[in-house]
Image: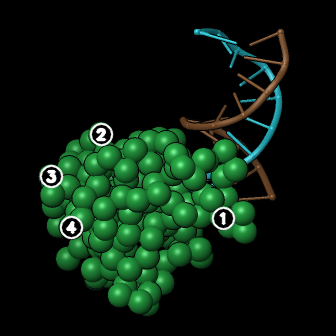
Chain colours: A green, B brown, C cyan
DNA sequence: GCCAACGTTGGC
DNA sequence: GCCAACGTTGGC
C-alpha cells in the first residue's frame, strides 16, 4: 500500500466533479510528463491512497482523499485526434502514456492550504516535493509519515 | 497578468 | 551530447 498526492485544477476537474462521476470514479487522463507517467504506470496499485490537491486556483491545497481504483493502462486520449491530450507521436501499438482510474473517498473537513504545508517545509514535511521551490510534478509520492502528518492538520 | 522554474525540442 | 529557445506549470 502506497500513498500519493495528485494535483488537479478545480476549474478543469475538481474533487466535487470526481464525487459526482458514475461510481465516483474517473480515468486520470491527460498526464504528459514522464516522471508522473512512470509513477502511475510502474508503481501505483489498486487501493493506494491519494491526497487530492487543487492547484492553480485562489487557495491551492489538499481538499480530499481518493484512491487508486484500477491497475495502470494506456491513456486512450493520446490516440484520439479529437482530444486535447492527443499525442501523434504515441504509437497505439506501443503506447507512450498510461493512467489509472481514481475513485473519490471523502472531502477533508477543511482545505489544508499550500501555505500551511509550506510552513512545515523545514520540519515534518522536509523533502516533500510539493513544498520545494519550483516543483511542477502533478503526481508525487507521499511517505506514510508525511501522510499522517498532513491529515493530522485536518482537525 | 506576471514571472520563476523546469521540461522538451531541435539545431549543430 | 550540448545548449538555446520555447512552452508549460502554477504560485502569487
Q: Nearer the viewer, residue A48 or A121?
A: A48
Q: Nearer the viewer, residue B12 or A118?
A: B12
Tag 3 and tag 1, C-beta contact below 8 Å: no
* 3 vs 4, front mark: 4
> For mark 4, what is the residue?
A47
Which residue is drawn at the image coordinates 59% and 64% (left, top)?
Answer: A77
* 1 vs 4, front mark: 1
Q: Residue A145 shows which numbered tag?
A: 3
Between disc 2 and disc 4, whose residue precedes?
4
Horizontal and vertical percent for residue A116?
A: 35, 60
Residue A65 image-quadrant placement? bottom left
Chain of the residue under label 1: A
> For mark 1, what is the residue?
A80
Between disc 1 and disc 4, whose residue precedes?
4
Horizontal and vertical percent for residue A74?
A: 47, 57
Left or right of A36 in this view: B12: right
Chain of the residue under label 4: A
Q: Nearer the viewer, residue A91 or A72?
A: A91
Tag 3 and tag 4, C-beta contact below 8 Å: no
Do the dots labelled 3 and 2 sit on one chain? yes
Q: Nearer the viewer, residue A47 or A77?
A: A77
Horizontal and vertical percent for residue A152?
A: 17, 67
Residue A3 image-quadrant placement? bottom left
Amino acid at each position: 500500500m502506497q500513498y500519493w498526492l495528485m494535483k488537479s485544477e478545480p476549474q478543469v476537474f475538481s474533487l466535487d466533479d470526481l464525487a459526482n462521476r458514475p461510481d465516483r470514479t474517473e480515468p486520470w487522463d491527460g498526464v504528459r510528463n514522464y516522471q508522473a507517467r512512470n509513477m502511475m504506470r510502474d508503481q501505483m496499485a489498486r487501493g493506494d491512497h491519494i491526497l487530492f490537491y487543487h492547484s492553480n486556483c485562489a487557495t491551492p491545497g489538499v481538499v480530499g482523499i481518493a484512491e487508486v481504483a484500477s491497475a495502470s493502462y494506456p491513456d486512450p486520449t493520446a490516440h484520439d485526434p479529437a482530444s486535447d491530450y492527443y499525442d501523434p507521436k504515441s504509437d497505439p501499438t506501443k503506447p507512450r502514456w498510461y493512467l489509472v482510474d481514481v475513485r473519490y473517498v471523502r472531502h477533508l473537513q477543511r482545505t489544508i492550504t499550500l501555505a500551511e504545508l509550506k510552513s512545515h517545509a523545514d520540519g515534518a514535511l522536509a523533502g516533500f516535493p510539493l513544498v520545494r521551490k519550483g516543483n511542477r510534478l502533478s503526481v508525487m509520492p507521499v511517505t506514510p509519515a508525511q501522510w499522517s502528518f498532513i491529515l493530522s492538520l485536518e482537525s
